[in-house]
Amino acid sequence: MRGKLLKRALDVIGAGVGLVVAAPIMAGVGVAIAANLGRPVLFRQVRPGKDGAPFRLVKFRTMRDATDRDGRPLPDHERLTPFGRWLRASSLDELPELWNVLRGDMSLVGPRPLLMQYLGRYSREQARRHEVRPGLTGWAQIHGRNAVEWNERLALDVWYVDHWSLALDLAILLRTITAVLRKDGISAPGEATMAEFMGSSAGAN
């Protein structure tokens, strides 16, 4: 219990300081997005949090609004502009998620919040990634991020759940800085980010 309270304290302090320090950068990014992609500047989407409870994640927008003849959004790789790719490569698009951390929807460190439709596709073991709050960064993010195939990535998330400690969180935060600077694992080969997770036969229910 004490460890969890300390983790939450680290989240609140880290997110609060981060929002203040990053405010000028976020303002600049917002202006650049408005000029390059138009409005809205922010992208909001419902994602599963701890225990799968939904919350509204907020990020900077990186894709243009573009649809086919039937009004359906074009594939991600067709909507992602060079400017949007740069935002993702720099991880600047993630800065607004500090607000989610401050609110308690997320933590600084934890499994990344994926999509609501994935909830029914996880094996019982993979679903354990939701035993903790999702994070801005995590164990999987410093071990390949989107370049790691799904089964390995989800296994890394569960490993974090089983081995969590404050020392591990601090180590992940430090290694994240290096990963961001090196732009490691921004996308899977041939994908704008990563192919959709369709489920796994490994460790099936």
Image (spheres, rainbow, N blue to C red):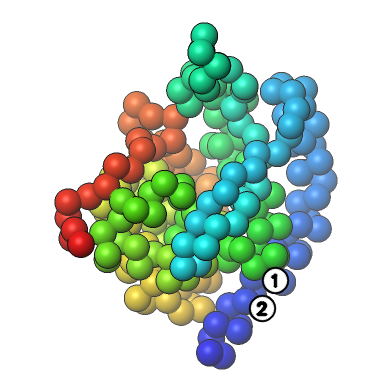
Distance between the alpha carbons at the discs numbered 2 and 1: 5 Å
Residue at position x 70%, y 71% in the image: 12
Residue at position x 55%, y 29% in the image: 85
Which residue is situated farthest in the front direction here?
70
Which residue is situated farthest in the bottom direction here?
2
Q: Is residue 61 left or right of residue 126?
A: right
Q: Secondary structure at mark 2?
A: helix
Estimate how packed mark 2 is, as few (under 14), some (14 to 19) or many (20 or more) residues with alpha carbons within 10 Å: few
Q: Quadrant of residue 39?
A: top right
Q: Residue 13, how many percent across, how many down?
A: 72, 72
Mark 2 near mark 1, Cβ–Cβ under 8 Å?
A: yes
Instruction: Report which residue position mark 2 lands on.
Output: 9
Instruction: Report which residue position mark 1 lands on.
Output: 12
Q: Say what amino acid the circle numbered 1 marks.
A: Val
Instruction: Classify 112 as above or below 185.
Output: below
Residue at position x 27%, y 54% in the image: 152
Q: Secondary structure at mark 1?
A: helix
